[in-house]
Image: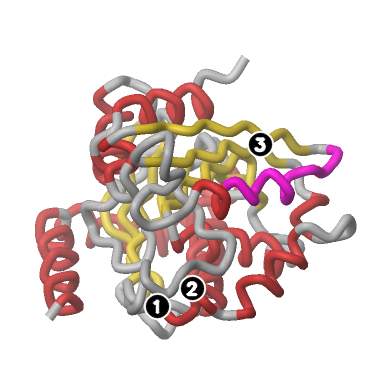
Amino acid sequence: MKKINLIIKVMLIILTTAVSGLILEQRVSASTTETTKSNKRQIPTLFFHGFGGTVHSMDYLIDQSQIDGYATRTLTITVNPQGKVRLFGNWPKSAHNPEIQILFLNNHESDYHHTAKWIDATLKKLHQNYGVTRFNAVAHSWGNNAVLYYLETYSQKKNQPQIDSLVNIAAPMQVLNRDIYRRNDWRYSKQLNRDFRTYIEPDSTIRKLHIRELNIMGQLTTEDHFDKAVPVASAQSLQRVFKGSHQTYQARLFTGPRAEHSALTRRNPKVLHDIENFLWNRP
């Protein structure tokens, strides 16, 4: 039923952008070479939802950034379980700090190795159609694991777009207690620890990247150190990853009801403010 609801929501987006989407796909195929050569678009920011995420998971961050004048919502991209990428909406060259929403149609894929392949397919499409060579990423929850695995496994491929800035929100980097998430066995998998050990190796691919990172964490109270889904200690592990010579690491810890796992992306203006300043108010 949840999968059906997701499909219905995606179809609503598709219907509301059908005309612009069809025009976009026709224009893209005819002008790929031209746009790749000109490459005048600003660095896009890609938004990745977490396990069970929907079309609304990142809406607040995307739309409010546009309202605040920091960025412009452009494309919505869907990726099916076979890795087929579809683009809806429009991305004019004049777009200011373009924002792109990524929707995985199988939003309950627990194996983030698969999700990382979908990220790879998405970036290939953006490179092919728009000449994208650099990008920012904002990831929530389980989406963080997919992004990090993508960076470690795919980012050194030929002609691969390179990450510039990364915002991790409520990242479950360590194995979690089984009482928290019973639907996603990968949260308790030893593979999670094996991958993390790879990321923190001195010669890991991630350590070699030129990257700015902002780690946003939440806790309901100062006593529990927990956002109702991810312990602060689990998310805090990211400080062990970004220690390369061309990397910077920042962390923010929020407390209270709006620091709850889902609320961090859906209704926390302080989180929004920090993301806007980190990505688009650079000195």
Q: Does the magenta stretch include residue 18?
A: no
Q: Looking at the image, which residue is at 60% across and 46% down?
A: 236
Secondary structure state at the residue bearing disc 2: helix
One can see residue 50 in this view: yes
The image quarter in which residue 229 lies: bottom left
Q: Which mark is residue 187?
A: 2
Look at the image and tell me whether residue 90 can be seen. Answer: no
Name which residue lies at 64% across and 54% down: 161
Q: Is residue 196 above or below residue 2?
A: above
Q: In this view, does 232 lie above or below 41?
A: below
* Element assignment for label 1: loop
Judge whether 173 appears above or below 46 on screen: below
| Residue ranking furthest to the top | 283
Question: Closest to the observer: 112 or 262?
Answer: 262
Q: Position of residue 221 (x, y in %)?
A: 36, 37
Q: Tell me which segment is drawn in magenta.
A: 236-245
Quadrant of image for the C terminus:
top right
At label 3, the amino acid type is Arg
On residue 212, the disc is 3
- Amino acid type, residue under disc 2 in the picture: Arg
First in residue order: circle 3 vs circle 1: 1
Circles 2 and 1 in contact, beta carbons < 8 Å: yes
Q: Which residue is drawn at 62% across and 39% down?
A: 213
Whichever of labels 2 and 3 marks the residue nearer the N terminus, that label is 2
